[in-house]
Image: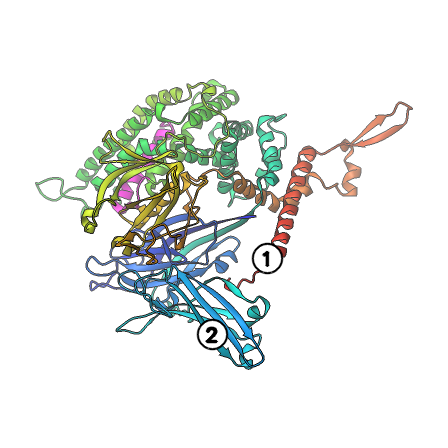
């Protein structure tokens, strides 16, 4: 069985951090590492000892991991950044909490002896004869060792090999043992150290192997994970401050596709051939057992399943029709966080994120760049924070409000004009889904007084649940790399409030407490007609224009998934100084090509077919003495490998590009199992020091390690496993409701469940009527039971087939 591991973490805030600057404060930021590899960096919060970050990430880690660590640093303009402290969580500690961690954790000091990483390749064998017992240990090689020197490398030994994190020793050691040393509880310890000429040697990690394993499986050979010394981490009594973290681990074993097909068939049947929309089905039963906490995840998973089946529009229509039919008051339509509301919300993110970027990004960038002080609430106006507007003297409150209204009107006008002019940019599948929604609402609320309800149903999703949240928090929608500062955040909040009023067609203006928003009411009311006209045009589309065929990706081949300026390394010709070796180029990524040119407007582009990509990996800093470099390895038709080196401006941008390219190439057939994290320069690889350019890579690739977001490739098996787990948790509830017989006293009083029937010979018998939904529930529960049995069978086989001993869990 394949394994699927996803790690969700949110760095909420810090408190009581120590002052590292002479000003008596600090400029903290967090670096997040998975097994000592940097996966994220938060924004720096300047001059603050209790910073708020609110940054969240999802990582897909198919090969699993061992630890997650958060390092809090103090940024310095001159010199190296200061280390404040760290928090390390083992995979076991995270996994032991079913609902995840959500708590304050004290920072601990950073001990170099605990900062180890990598693996060592060993072969161990006990040699016994009549005269002596000895241990033969072959120290073959190591990989991904921690960098201990300023050059970003180490000098590991038995035999010292300088400037490498991937040493090849090939040495054999024999040690004569005393019989007392061979007791079962004894261990063999192999330690790796970094040699230093001046200071003391640095610890790089250790492996401990019980003698019991050597007695059972001679000889023992394999790769062993290096472990720290095991010093007890002390939290310093909270003197280093604390972080509030939210962390959740989801681990699944994924069965072969054939086992999930019956459940997919039931889900498909629910939407393509429902007898009555109110009848029970696999989908309605899933909604019954779905919890509030998991509803968003389930909604996104269902959207992906039906996208993959080419049935996302019928799926949404099915849920929306049930919601509309069960709503009597149009004012409450789609106001709850029901499965239908969440499904529409996640659907817009899945298929409309690039459209949202196209509409909003220029305006959001303008707001961030201008950094205007804007405030309408008289209670919050701070005259000391605004720049001088008039040269006549101090700025008055009235001048601040007048300037704020003018800027907000300008921003809001640009946003509305961009949205209402985007009909042709909106993905056709979104337009068809809204057309079906419009039809269902119009059928249910056909009275003249409910004329606006059909518009409000669409605008409620389009403006209130899509565009307004993106304006409020651009980083969560990947419109910006960092969260807004306090001043810009306030501007975005006021604009989001105004856009919500636009989405409500101005019907609630003047009824709330925020009367200070009144200066924006005229522009909101003037926009109502254009918004209605936009919604009419939006749903004016032929249903058949949407190709309802199964697909493997959320985005279409011609759509640009990611774009932006990067620096491409000039690999040809003589070795250049670092400052001249990179050229700034504009890159575009689609599911078919990675292309680049001198500028976005440049007509001539160079391109790499995505189908030729066989690895996308980080590059060690010492390869070019540059940070945040990645390599895209491709293979031509003759099997020759080619490498392009690209530099990003920071670690977050690096991870985003790595993830994006890996996602579009995830189904390529010729992915490499290993790679060189260095570069071949001066006749050898800078990582493992091997001379042969074609030698097998010295480090494992990470092709399936990606950041989780709206662009995740569709994976029917993983998605159906998620739905199965939800149904498994609610199985008893479904069985009790649909299949269990009522108590005897209930049976005697429930005459409506008994129906007399007359046989041809005149005899009368009683027939037990089935409960509503009983047949559908029986089929669904049988599928759940079969999947549970399949999991148990595969897990038992894994246990039986596993003959190796896990030495370093």
Q: Against 91, is 265 above or below? A: above
Q: Residue furthest left?
A: 392
| Residue 284 visible in the displayed image | no
**Location of residue 183 (image quadrant):** bottom right
Residue segment shown in magenta = 479-507
Which of the two discs, 1 and 2, labels the residue nearer the N terminus? 2
User: Within 10 Å of the Cα at label 2, are there few (<14), some (14-19), or many (20+) other Cα atoms?
Assistant: some
x then y, percent, for residue 364: 28, 37
Residue picked out by circle 2 = 174
Residue 495 drawn in magenta: yes
Q: Is residue 804 left or right of residue 514?
A: right
Q: Against 204, is 541 above or below? A: above
Q: Which mark, residue 384? A: none
Count of marks, rendered view: 2
Residue 699 drawn in magenta: no
**Location of residue 23 (image quadrant):** bottom left
**Location of residue 735 (image quadrant):** top right
Colour convention of the picture: rainbow
x then y, percent, for residue 200: 30, 74
Q: Secondary structure at mark 1?
A: loop
User: Within 10 Å of the Cα at label 1, are there few (<14), some (14-19), or many (20+) other Cα atoms?
Assistant: few
The Cα–Cα distance between marks 1 and 2, rounded to whole angstroms, is 30 Å
x then y, percent, for residue 754: 79, 32
x then y, percent, for residue 334: 48, 32
Of 506 and 130, the residue lying toward us: 130
| Residue 507 visible in the displayed image | yes
Residue picked out by circle 1 = 802
Q: Residue at x 55, y 28 (%)?
A: 318
Q: Secondary structure at mark 2?
A: strand
Q: Against 761, is 163 above or below? A: below
Q: Residue at x 50, y 68 (%)?
A: 124
């Amino acid at each position: 069985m394949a394994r699927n591991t996803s790690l969700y973490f949110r760095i909420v805030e810090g408190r009581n951090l120590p002052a590292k600057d002479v000003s008596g404060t600090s400029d903290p930021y967090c670096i997040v590492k998975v097994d000592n590899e940097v996966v994220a960096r938060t924004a720096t919060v300047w001059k603050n000892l209790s910073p708020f970050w609110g940054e969240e990430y999802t990582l897909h880690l198919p090969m699993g991991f061992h630890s997650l660590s958060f390092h809090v640093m103090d940024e310095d303009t001159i010199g190296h950044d200061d280390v404040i402290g760290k928090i390390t969580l083992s995979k076991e500690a995270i996994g032991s909490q079913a609902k995840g961690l959500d708590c304050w954790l004290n920072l601990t000091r950073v001990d170099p002896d605990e900062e180890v990483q990598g693996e060592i390749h060993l072969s161990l064998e006990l040699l016994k004869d009549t005269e002596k017992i000895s241990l033969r240990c072959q120290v073959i090689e190591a990989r991904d060792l921690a960098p201990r020197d300023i050059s970003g490398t180490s000098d590991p030994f038995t035999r010292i090999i300088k400037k490498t994190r991937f040493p090849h020793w090939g040495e054999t050691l024999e040690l004569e043992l005393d019989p007392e040393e061979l007791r079962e509880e004894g261990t063999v310890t192999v330690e790796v150290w970094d040699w230093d000429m001046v200071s003391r040697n640095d610890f790089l990690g250790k492996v401990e192997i019980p003698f019991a394993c050597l007695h059972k499986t001679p000889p023992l050979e394999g790769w062993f994970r290096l472990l720290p010394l095991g010093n007890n981490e002390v939290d310093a009594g909270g003197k280093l401050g604390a972080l509030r973290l939210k962390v959740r681990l989801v681990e699944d074993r994924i069965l072969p596709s054939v086992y999930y097909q019956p459940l997919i068939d039931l889900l498909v049947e629910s939407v393509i051939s429902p007898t009555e929309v109110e009848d029970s089905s696999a989908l309605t039963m899933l909604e019954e057992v779905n919890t509030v906490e998991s509803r968003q995840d389930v909604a996104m998973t269902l959207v992906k399943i039906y996208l993959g089946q080419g049935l996302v529009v019928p799926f949404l229509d099915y849920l929306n029709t049930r919601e509309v039919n069960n709503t009597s008051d149009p004012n409450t339509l789609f106001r709850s966080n029901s499965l239908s509301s969440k499904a529409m919300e996640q659907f817009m993110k899945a298929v409309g994120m690039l459209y949202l970027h196209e509409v909003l990004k220029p305006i959001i960038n303008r707001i961030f760049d201008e950094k205007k002080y804007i405030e309408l609430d008289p209670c919050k106006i701070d005259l000391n924070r605004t720049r001088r507007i008039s040269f006549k003297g101090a700025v008055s409150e009235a001048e601040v409000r007048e300037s704020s209204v003018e800027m907000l009107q300008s921003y809001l006008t640009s946003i509305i004009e961009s949205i209402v002019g985007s009909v042709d940019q909106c993905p056709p599948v979104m337009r068809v889904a809204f057309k079906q929604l419009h039809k269902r609402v119009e059928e249910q609320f056909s009275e003249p007084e409910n004329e606006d309800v059909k518009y409000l149903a669409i605008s409620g999703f389009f403006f209130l649940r899509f565009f307004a949240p993106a304006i409020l928090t651009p980083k969560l929608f990947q419109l910006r790399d960092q969260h807004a500062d306090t001043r810009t955040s306030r501007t975005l909040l006021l604009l989001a409030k105004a856009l919500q009023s636009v989405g409500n067609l101005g019907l609630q203006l003047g009824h709330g407490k925020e009367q200070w928003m009144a200066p924006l009411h005229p522009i909101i009311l003037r926009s109502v007609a254009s918004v209605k006209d936009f919604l009419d045009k939006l749903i004016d589309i032929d249903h058949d224009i949407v190709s309802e065929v199964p697909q493997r990706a959320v985005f279409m081949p011609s759509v640009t998934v990611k774009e932006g300026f990067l620096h491409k390394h000039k690999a040809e010709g003589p070795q250049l100084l670092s400052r001249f070796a990179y050229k700034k180029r504009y890159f575009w990524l689609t599911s078919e090509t990675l292309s680049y040119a001198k500028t976005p407007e440049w007509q001539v582009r160079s391109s790499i077919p995505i189908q030729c990509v066989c690895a996308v990996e980080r590059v060690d800093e010492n390869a070019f003495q540059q940070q945040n470099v990645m390599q895209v390895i491709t293979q031509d038709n003759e099997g020759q490998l080619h490498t392009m080196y690209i530099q990003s401006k920071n670690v977050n941008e690096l991870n985003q590009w790595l993830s994006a390219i890996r996602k579009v190439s995830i189904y390529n057939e010729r992915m490499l199992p290993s790679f060189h994290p260095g570069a071949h320069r001066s006749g050898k690889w800078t990582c493992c020091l091997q001379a042969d350019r074609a030698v097998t890579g010295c480090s494992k690739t990470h092709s399936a390690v990606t950041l989780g977001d709206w662009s995740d490739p569709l994976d029917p098996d993983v998605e159906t496993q998620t739905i199965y787990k939800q149904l498994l948790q609610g199985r008893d509830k479904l069985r009790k409701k649909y299949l269990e017989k009522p108590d005897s006293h209930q049976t005697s009083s429930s005459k409506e469940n008994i129906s007399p029937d007359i046989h041809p010979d005149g005899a009368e018998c009683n027939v037990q009527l089935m409960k509503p939904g009983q047949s559908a529930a029986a089929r669904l529960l049988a599928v759940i039971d079969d999947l549970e049995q399949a999991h148990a069978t595969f897990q038992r086989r894994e246990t039986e087939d596993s003959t190796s001993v896990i030495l370093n869990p």
